[in-house]
Amino acid sequence: MLPITADIYLDEELLNWQFVRASGPGGQHVNKVSTAVLLQLDIRQSGLPDWLQQRLLKLADHRISQSGKITIKCQQSRSQEQNRELALAQLLALLQSATKTPKKRLATKPSYSSQQKRLQSKKQQGQTKALRQQKRFD
């Protein structure tokens, strides 16, 4: 069991690990060894609380597909074990970010002085543009 928060845990058996060949530079080593890690988790079958599943599905994250699967690819290291740890850390960070409730925005009005400054800058801009115009003499 992986701890996400103090009272929410994720079963490690639900994680789908795949090891593929990494792309990019690295010479013959890249062509021989499958060091890149693909980590997948189906949100709907994860056993996470419903509120957390809904938040994850609403997140605008490129790692979450329309079908509700989280896919993390990690190929930063030449070591498969390090890539595995990094992918797991990214997954936990994503899940922990979804547990935090966003602050509710309080609507505020602009202050009187900020309104006056805005109007003054608009007048100044209008005067500057008026100087650029050519005067017509009929």
Image (cartoon, rainbow, N blue to C red):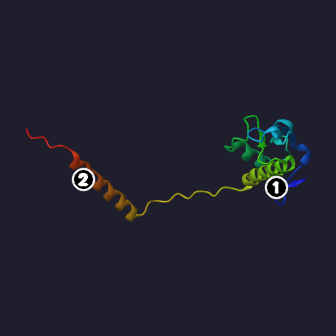
The x, y position of residue 65, in whole percent, is 73, 37
Q: CA distance from mark 2 to mark 1?
A: 59 Å
Residue that protrudes farthest toward the bottom in the picture = 113
Q: Residue at x 9, y 41 (%)?
A: 137
Q: Image height check: is 99 above or below 39?
A: below
Q: Residue at x 84, y 48 (%)?
A: 79
Residue that protrudes farthest toward the left in the picture = 138
Residue that protrudes farthest toward the front in the picture = 28
The x, y position of residue 76, in whole percent, is 76, 47
User: How many marks do you count on the picture?
Assistant: 2
Describe residue 107's horizontal placement relative to residue 41 as left or right: left
Q: Element type at marker 1?
A: loop
Q: Which mark is residue 85?
A: none
Front residue (pair 40, 67)? 40
Q: Element type at marker 2?
A: helix
Amino acid type at circle 2 is Gln
The residue tagged 2 is 127
Amino acid type at circle 1 is Ile
Front residue (pair 19, 50)? 19
The residue tagged 1 is 4
Estimate how packed mark 1 is, as few (under 14), some (14 to 19) or many (20 or more) residues with alpha carbons within 10 Å: some
Query: Which image quarter is the C terminus in?
Result: top left
The x, y position of residue 103, in whole percent, is 63, 58
The x, y position of residue 58, in whole percent, is 69, 43
Estimate how packed mark 2 is, as few (under 14), some (14 to 19) or many (20 or more) residues with alpha carbons within 10 Å: few
Q: Image height check: is 32 above or below 122?
A: above
